[in-house]
Amino acid sequence: MDKVVKSDAEWRVQLSPEEFRVLRQAGTERPFTGEYVDTKTVGVYNCRACGAELFRSDTKFESHCGWPSFFEPSESDAVTLIEDRTLGMTRVEVRCAACDSHLGHVFHGEGYPTPTDDRYCINSVSLTLKPV
């Protein structure tokens, strides 16, 4: 996989202020406000920053958490997982493996009826859906 490396100035030209805040500064969009929370469209979800394929619609499920949820990435190396100790808790941050953009967090063992029992809780603003 080719790595995408850009300066903050280059990212600011390419991304909207909200996209930059979430993707490059590890922000979070408000729950239930993202364009893909309730989307049922069949397709591929790509990184909004670099276009890398991240998730497929057949792994998206209704978690009612306020953000799009997936039970696994499209490829095992599509994302990187990093321990996140911000906000006084330990979580696992999900980043795009190609450009290192913040996507959201993954949670395990919550009891959702999915094959992996994982919930990749991803900001809509981090994604672009390409319908199939």
Image (cartoon, rainbow, N blue to C red):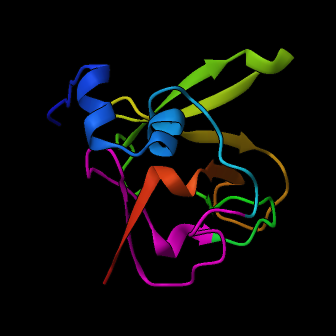
Q: From the viewer's perspective, is residue 33 above or below residue 107?
A: below
Which of the 4 quarters of the picture holds residue 24?
top left
Relative to 131, 70 lies left or right: right
> How far from the left and from the top, in percent, is residue 66?
76, 60
Q: Is residue 30 magenta?
A: no
- Residue sitting at 81 percent across and 20 percent down? 87
Q: From the viewer's perspective, is residue 86 above or below residue 29?
A: above
> How far from the left and from the top, in percent, is residue 14?
27, 42
- Residue sitting at 72 percent across and 42 percent down? 107
Can I make out residue 89 in this image?
A: no
How many labels, in total?
A: 0
> How far from the left and from the top, in percent, is residue 125?
51, 53
Relative to 58, 107 lies left or right: right
| Farthest-out residue, left | 2
From the image, which quarter does the C terminus lie in?
A: bottom left
Q: From the viewer's perspective, is residue 37 above or below residue 13?
A: below
Can I make out residue 76 in this image?
A: yes
Magenta span covers which residues?
Answer: 33-60
From the image, which quarter does the N terminus lie in?
A: top left
> How far from the left and from the top, in percent, is residue 15?
35, 43
Q: Is residue 45 magenta?
A: yes
Which of the 4 quarters of the picture holds residue 68?
bottom right
In the image, 103 versus 117, the foreground residue is 103
Relative to 40, 29 lies left or right: right
Relative to 81, 50 lies left or right: left
In the image, 18 versus 84, the foreground residue is 18
- Residue sitting at 55 percent across and 58 percent down? 124
- Residue sitting at 84 percent across and 50 percent down? 110
